[in-house]
Amino acid sequence: MQRLSRVFQALTGILLSGLVSIANAHGHDETNTAMGEPSAAMASTEIADSQTYFHHNAYAGFMTAHIILMTIGWVFILPVGIMLSVSRSKYRFLVQFTFLAVNTVGVLLAITYNASTPDLYPNNAHHKLGWILTWVAGAQVFLGMLSAYAQRDPQEKGEEQVSFIPISQEVMVEHQRINDLRFQDPHRFSYDSGHGTEPNTESLRSQSMSSTGSDQLPLCNMRNDLLGEANEEEEEKLLGMKSTRLNRLLSKKASRLFASRLLRAIQLLYSSADYSILFLAWVGFLTGWVTYGGFFMGDRVFSGLAHLIKGSVFFGFGIMSLARWAGCWSEMGWAWNIKRSKKSLRTAEFVESSLVFIYGITNVFLEHLNAWGSEWTAQDLEHLAITFLFIGGGLCGLLIESRKIRNYLNVTTEDLNYEQEGNKEQSVEPKSYGFSMNPFPGLVTLLVGIMMSSHHQDSMVSTMIHKQWGTLLVAAAFCRGLTYIIYYIAPPTSTLPGRPPTELVTSFCLMAGGFIFMASARDTVMAIEGNGLDAMFIFTVSMGLIAALMAWIITVIAIKGWAVRKEQSSSYSYRPVLTAV
């Protein structure tokens, strides 16, 4: 184990600055003293490095195992569980319980490590966030079980299956034959004995009632048997495991314990947890590597937050673009297709413009917080101008996405006279109006990439890293522009995902650009230089990781489609259930 930990530490030292793209910020958000004296900054960083968990060799095996298990749980198992949960697959709880088990072991290893080592990063956010993530993950599974049990009534479910699923005539004949043998009456009816042969005699009436009852009894028994089998199948489907006494008890009681309003609230919380837990997991990974590497201590935290937020915005932008290419949100028309519903729905470009606008508003003064109270420098003003670019570009994008604004822009003083002259046919909206083509999110990305590619830095490594992710953002913007050109010439005509190939390149460049962006902070650049690495190594490693991550994201989305199709096929599977008695 010690040898494994040493190997892992060596690899982590090589990849630390670029791998998990910690909370970073342009390598230019420092105070004037740090900018004027890079050698002093290097010395202070080296001193800080000697007091980090990365350089603490005691009990390193526990930390190695913790990192490996958390990566397996949160990167591989959890996304699969969420996709199965969204598709309401019968395997969702099995995968989620597996994730909880892996996460629990990882938490225990972290507790053991913390108890055995000194606190080298006082008051760090990762410890607190780790507990929050653990409780949220547990609550998600608990709410999912409550929702699954409470929204079904076993008796009503069985009745519904019995009433509406058809049965073949051959099965009916075979069942009747078997039950005739089991319930055969040893007495025969005598219609020629002279006793009670009149149609309305009491003996014939009682005999007829007895015969009818004996004929119906086997059918009722079959009906009850099939009801029980259907309920057991539903219980097994619920958890993906064999029916147990506890399972049957919960199925009977849960739907009676919760009012419909409370059940809707539980389902809403469960759905919210499905989508929010991945964001929390991303934040947990970032804070974990910040704590492990000892980055952004003291007033440098604002520098780290700035780059963490900016890099994550572009990284998330890339994941969203990849998900759109893969077919997510196709029902809303976000997958480069026409929407299935004629309702007025927000476009993907509206969401992108909103994020750009909100980011610009919330980050106006973030770059200057680490030097708050001191004189504003030229670089501070540059960063402020970038936030105004986000505000203006996002606002323009929102205005373009407004249907009312577009309608007002179409109005001219000549419109009324033109239509009265019989030119209504020429006033029909062009086909391009049916599809959103908003260039401002891409334009903001292009300008940020150009500016950062030529941004002055204190070292050659930092300058090259900034040029790398700036160039990637420029490439992403150009590919998005090509997508709009393609769809302007030939607008989509199908509800199926369009999957333009240019969007794959857009996604890759955005994810890779955001990833390297988060590795361009001053602290991480110092770590790169301190370990004898260069910018090209970080670039090549990042490209490989992003390509692998894209493959995994596509696989996870495909798993969701497989689960949905499997659930649909099982719902329509044939069951020989009696329809009438």
Image: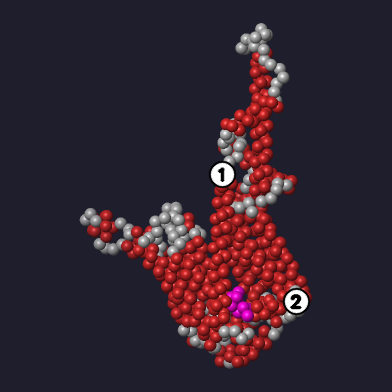
- Using a 10 Å C-alpha cutoff, classify the residue at mark 1 as few (fewer than 14 neighbours), some (14 to 19) or many (20 or more): few
Q: Which of the marked residues, 1 or 2, is nearer the chain's N terminus? A: 2
Against 178, residue 575 (above or below) is below
Q: Distance from label 1 to label 2 (Cα)?
A: 55 Å
Against 79, residue 284 (above or below) is below
Residue 20 highlighted magenta (yes or no): yes
The residue under the point 36% across, 64% down is: 488
The residue under the point 45% across, 76% down is: 474
Q: Is residue 392 visible?
A: no
Task: Classify residue 443 as left or right of residue 426.
Answer: right
Q: Residue furthest right?
A: 116
The residue under the point 46% across, 81% down is: 451
Against 496, residue 43 (above or below) is below
x and y percentages locating residue 360 in the rendered image: 49, 74
Residue 2, label in figure: 2
Comparing labels 1 and 2, the label whose residue is closer to the camera: 2
x and y percentages locating residue 160 in the rendered image: 60, 39
As helix, strand or loop, the secondary structure at mark 1 comes to: loop
Q: Which residues are magenta?
A: 14-22
Looking at this view, is 306 or 290 the one in front? 290
The residue under the point 56% across, 47% down is: 569
Tag 1 residue: 572
Residue 353 highlighted magenta (yes or no): no
Magenta span: predominant SS is loop
Q: Amino acid at mark 1?
A: Tyr
Image quarter hosting the N terminus: bottom right
